[in-house]
Image (spheres, rainbow, N blue to C red):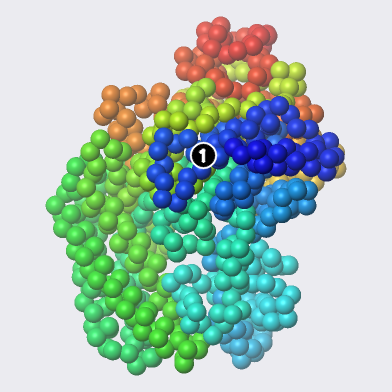
Amino acid sequence: MREEEKQLIRQCVDALREGIPGFKSRRPQMEMIATIANTLARCRAEDEQAGNGDHIAIVEAGTGTGKSFGALVPALVMAKSRQKRLVVSSSTVALQHQYAEKDAPSLQRLLPLPFTFAVAKGRRRYACVAKLQAEALAAGQGGLDLGDAGKGPAGVAAEDGVRGASAVRELAVQFDDGRWNGDRDELALPVTDEVWERITTDRQGCSGTKCSEFARCPFQAARQRVKDADLVIANHDLVLSAIDMDGASVLPAAQDTIYVFDEAHSLAAKAVEHFSASHALRGAVEWLEGARNAVRDAVLGLRLDEQLIRDSLTSSRKIESALRDLHHRIHSTNGFDEKRARRFKGGPLPSWCQSAGEQILGAGEELQKTFASLREHVLEQAPSTGTLATQILSVLGFYVVRLDNLVDTWHLMLAEQPENAPPIARWIERHDEGGRPGDYLVCASPISGSDKLRKLLWNRASGAVVMSATLTSCGTFDLFLRQSGLGFFESPAFLQVESPFDYRNNARLVVPAMRAEPTEAKQHTEEVISRLPALVVTLGTLVLFTSAKQMKEVYAQLPEELRRVTLVQGSMPKGEMLARHRSAVDRGDRSVIFGLSTFAEGVDLPGEYCTHVVIAKLPFSVPDSPLEEARREWVESRGGSPFIEITVPEAAVRLKQGLGRLLRTVTDTGRVTILDRRIVTKRWGGLLMRGMPDFEVVIERGRQAARGAQGLKNESAVGP
């Protein structure tokens, strides 16, 4: 580090200490700042190789350590000093809003370091002005005929249509008056997804500089703000899309960027999801007919070369023929009556699937060329055809996205399985959704995103900070390093920053003397039901389940008094549940939340809002999905134990996340109750607890209580 960089960081910390009431620069936070600054001092030049990974910092920072400021202060200083762009990426919308609405404005106001920031979002978060104006014009011409409103389903649909038309006209007026900037998140009143779908677009449906409304385009304005900003606030999905797009993204190129990934524990799973693909067989046959019609209408409407129609017919019919053959072959096996999914094991696909796939892929790539050529012709005529070109591109874009997905699926399905590397999982799945009973999904997914992350992100990034409160599991970084691709590097910087919370004196972890284990599903559910009334005694309680079935069964059999104050995930949006819970506690009323895994992370309920977390069952994943089967098969093929290498470490991360819902500030107190005796009766129970917060642990005496208790630290035993 240069001396002026060190000095500026000191000045920034002093400015925060003076400008934020009660701000304390604790030693752990200062260690974090120093580690990140020293790491980013080794950020890479554009043409420099990633080397040993010494440009990457891996930081586990417990709740309450102030990790957002601890990372942003040194990252801002180093990015400005080394002339790099800074992208901070979060896994949740709530955290992205915190950075955009709280953290970045505070730093901008207080630091002796001028910087600009902007929020990066996908194109579909913005209105397409050309479509908005066209829809508003059509809505105005349609009038306000309420004659059938309120008369059965048709009347309801008519009334909804009137409200939608009115909403579109009002949005157009607000945009023209400058009262709305076209960002969906900036709307004073939300609009339905159906209305928004009519006035937004994607990359395929956008005519770019050829659009008559390009100068007023909200997305292009936002893109320019992002391009000019020193700090870009994004999310993991957007970053993954960017590194996969070769420069066509709103985000800066990885070679010019220092990244800060908050909640980085979710990055690997998001990468697997991003690089996977699937499509429905009968569903694809249906949209292919629509695609042919769209090509025909575009060619005839703009008087283009009719060879485009003939080419699209030839290609789409080849695809359709192969899809029908596949569907017939799969459906005639009757192999999906008892099992929803069937996976292809390692090696080449069966010949019947291989040949059909090759026909689909070849014809699909030809159809892609036809759509690309048609798009070029439409764009050439855009200046003279106005909104007609926008409407045509929007329709064509709908089918291009589906065609690209179909081609991507078969690229993965037919790809050669790499030697000595994690394979691609491939399977067929029964798909009865969308009003098409008897349909099937063709699915393909890498079992790990590590290789893609290493090649597309870590090898290219100028520098990176990955941080979370749950990067370790069972006391080590091993799982995270394997899944994220960072295990390939020899010398990244590691830091574990302890939480300032006094867990020992402020929190207790209790393991009751349960008679039933979760493997005895019926008996365990009955015991959870019988124990809960005595456990829910404070104002705010969070009960975490791993199974929606058990959660509903428990709720249905609770005493009426308790059921009245319990909010169940799925009964309303998550945000509304949390708002109702807080309101009840604010009134001094008892409130209970029943939630699944999404309530085990990213939920902030400080103080009285949550003084008791009840964990109904240890959060093991159910290894019945084809992807999980393939992951376990891969580990076994290398002589490993899937249970020890995957199941237990992943459960440890989820357990740590659930425990993290209890104490959210230094003054919080409370209790965690785990209604799963296996944490003390099984040998792996001690593994799960390694690296967990330093709770006082209480193990109630009961069946097999003595055995396994040695795996838990700081335990005491009490009578039942």
| 336 or 209: nearer the viewer | 209
Which residue is depicted at the point 50% across and 53% down? 256
Which residue is depicted at the point 27% across and 56% down? 411
Q: Quadrant of residue 718?
A: top right
| 654 or 570: nearer the viewer | 654
**In which quadrant of the rendered image does the C terminus lie?**
top right
State the residue lying farthest toward the front: 3
Disc 1 marks a residue whose amino acid type is Arg
Q: Estimate the x, y position of residue 431 in percent, counting from the top left.
A: 37, 55
Is 109 on the left or on the right of 55, as rendered?
A: right
Residue linked to disc 1: 42
Which residue is depicted at the point 38% across and 91% down? 302
Q: Estimate the x, y position of residue 656 in percent, counting from the top left.
A: 58, 29
**In which quadrant of the rendered image does the N terminus lie?**
top right
Q: Is residue 386 at least partly visible in the picture?
A: yes
Q: Estimate the x, y position of residue 279 in percent, counting from the top left.
A: 34, 59
**Compared with residue 470, is residue 515 higher up or lower down, i.e. above or below?**
above
